[in-house]
Amino acid sequence: MPALALAFLAAALGILCGIEPIYGLAAALGAAFVLVLLVDLYAGLIIFILVVSLSEAPGFLGGDVTLSKLLGGLLLATWLAHLAMRRGAGESFFGSRHPAATWLLAALLAWVAITGVWAPAPAASIDGAFRLFLSLTLFLIAFTAVHTRSQVIGLIAAIIAGACLDAAIGLTTANDVADAARLAGGQTSPGELAAVLAAGLVLSLGLARVMRGNQLAQLAALGAGGLCLLGVFMTGSRAGLIAVAVALVAFIAVGGRWRGRALIISAAVVALTYSFFAYAATPEIRERVTTVGSGSGRVDLWTVGWRMVEDEPLKGIGYGNYPTSASDYVLEPGAVARGRYVIDQAKVAHNMYLQQWAETGLIGLVLFLAILAFCLSSSLRAGREFARAGDQAMEMLCRVVFAATFAVLAGAFFGSNQFEKDLWLVLALGPVLLSVAGSRRALGAVHGRT
């Protein structure tokens, strides 16, 4: 029977390739991905992270096929099948492990959907709610798929590699940002890429410490960290530089026994930053970083967002409705110097927290911030668990994850990154580490009784 099914699949793929080769290739890759997922959900997650970074490269399956969406749909479907067939796969998060966080995630998703009732553009709310659902499922898939120390290290390595691949694609392709001198990713704007690279920089340093016994892996991690820092410089993003600074300050604050090293690393990063912008940066990037201004109309976008908050502070204007409703708030009293960014070019708020407040009100903002606080606290709690177990390398990695989470959250203050996969993958690292630390503690308790 399996042989017959494989023969039928091969015939179907052959026919599809004859009709339209690009779709046949996509179907073949999708079938192979499903087989990987059925055998190992973790391996499928790692492949997905890396492929998403490559899928928008020029000529990659052609312009009519978005491989990341295809694989994302297959990943979601397989994860749901895992939950249906293996009840324990979800109980560790949904039930006994994190019941409060489960209610927070469900409440946020429900409230986002409810805001569509009074939204001026209900279709935009439905689309935004679905995108949030996909982001939350990626968060939960990471928790479901990662169970061991080596797997969490692999997940962190994949996040770093994905950021580096995104930057590498940006280096080899023309970007459509107004300032072509700035580095943009294959799928991300310079600011979004800079925030991810800032987190990648800090994670690389932590990964290098964990891989100290493997010289080749340690050198690769340090090399990735250097690439991430150079990428932040080349984006010309002030938000990215702020994200790096915030991450380093956060690491110093929770560094514990590694605080001295964190101070040395911070001093080195400051020296490298000064040297780059003083001697190596292009005049355009240097001027952009050193000149204080409103950026691409960001101050005006924030002004419009704040007007939305003042109009509907508690319930918001409706999820996903900032771009469609922004023009209605331009004509209110008060100067908006660059109204074209709001009227002619419908943009997001360029501040994740302000947009969340404007669209979902104070209720949605509090739920969202509570989820962020849960993820941050999870990494610190995991660090304490590893410290009790005497695993200093993993303890330090937990503190690094805390700092990296602050990096992406700081970057999100200057960008609407609430649907970015990297944001939710980094957020997932805290609960994942806490789960792995708890499993090691339980295993140690079992061994202690035997």
Image (spheres, rainbow, N blue to C red):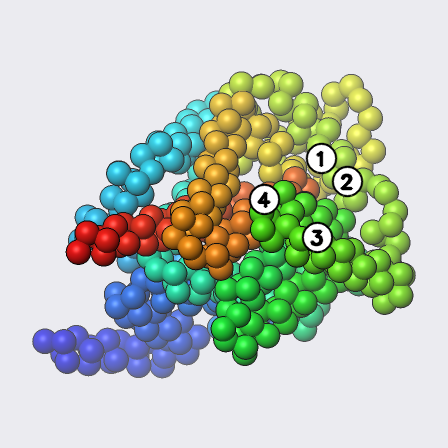
Identify the residue at horizontal 45%, vertical 37% (top origin).
Answer: 374
The disc label shown at residue 254, or none:
4
- Could you classify mark 2 by the number of other residues whose Cα lies within 10 Å: few (under 14), some (14-19), or many (20 or more)? many
Q: Is residue 438 left or right of residue 293?
A: left
Which numbered disc, 1 or 3, marks the residue that appears first in the sequence?
Answer: 3
Mark 2–mark 3 distance (CA, rounded to whole Å): 35 Å
**Residue type, numbered disc 2:** Gly
Looking at the image, do the residues carrying marks 4 and 1 touch, with CB atoms under 8 Å apart? no
The residue singled out by tag 1 in the image is: 301
Q: Amino acid at mark 3?
A: Leu
Give coordinates of residue 112: x percent, y percent.
45, 31
Do the residues under discs 4 and 2 have CB atoms within 8 angstroms?
A: no
In primary-sequence order, the first of circles 4 and 1 is 4
The amino acid type found where label 4 is placed reads Val
Residue 397 position, x and y percent, is: 51, 55
Quarter of the C terminus within the rendering: bottom left
Tag 2–tag 1 contact (CB < 8 Å): yes
Identified at 56% across, 52% down, the residue is: 400
Q: Secondary structure at mark 4?
A: helix
**Label whose residue precedes the other's in the sequence (2 or 3):** 3
Residue under the image location 31 percent in, 70 percent down: 36
Q: Is residue 423 above or below residue 230?
A: above
**x and y percentages locating residue 249 in the rendered image:** 67, 45
Residue 263 image label: 3
Which label lies toward us, 4 or 1? 4
